[in-house]
Image (cartoon, rainbow, N blue to C red):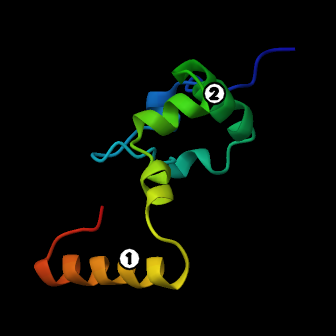
Amino acid sequence: MPDSRPSCFGISEQCMPRDENGIIQPQENCRHCDHLRECLQEAIDACGGVEKLKSDSGSQSAQRKAEPEGVVGAILRWSERKRAAQRGGTTP
């Protein structure tokens, strides 16, 4: 049985490239591929695994853990977004 996988199979630069902020961006043309799950798993493994991808993308989960939670945290996050919008900047 011939291999029916596309030529881009498992190549992270093609199936999950990063944007200018280092965030992985899924490709629209991959969405309907029959091999999507296997392809992404192979690409993630080739990059060093999920934890490596998280650390490389600047995951904010570690930063979020240090921030207040609940209502106080929500108000602080909202306030920061509002100030950034007023300055014309983006939120971290």
Question: Which residue is at the front of the view, 50 or 17?
Answer: 50
- Across and down, in percent, residue 12 comes to 50, 29
Q: Secondary structure beneath disc 1? A: helix
Report the residue that reaches farthest toward the left: 87
Disc 2 from disc 1: Cα separation? 43 Å
Quadrant of the frame with the C terminus: bottom left
* Type of the residue with mark 1: Arg
Q: Secondary structure beneath disc 2? A: loop
**For mark 1, what is the residue?**
77
Report the residue that reaches farthest toward the right: 1
**Residue plotted at (45% across, 57% down):** 66
- Left or right of 6 on screen, residue 64: left
* Type of the residue with mark 2: Pro
Label number found at residue 59: none
- Across and down, in percent, residue 10 comes to 60, 25
- Across and down, in percent, residue 35 comes to 73, 35
Choose top left, top right, bottom left or bottom right for residue 9. top right
Of callouts 2 and 1, the N-terminal one: 2
Label number found at residue 6: 2
Q: Residues within 10 Å of mark 2 (few under 14, many from 20)?
A: few
- Across and down, in percent, residue 28 comes to 52, 52
**Residue plotted at (51% across, 48% down):** 26
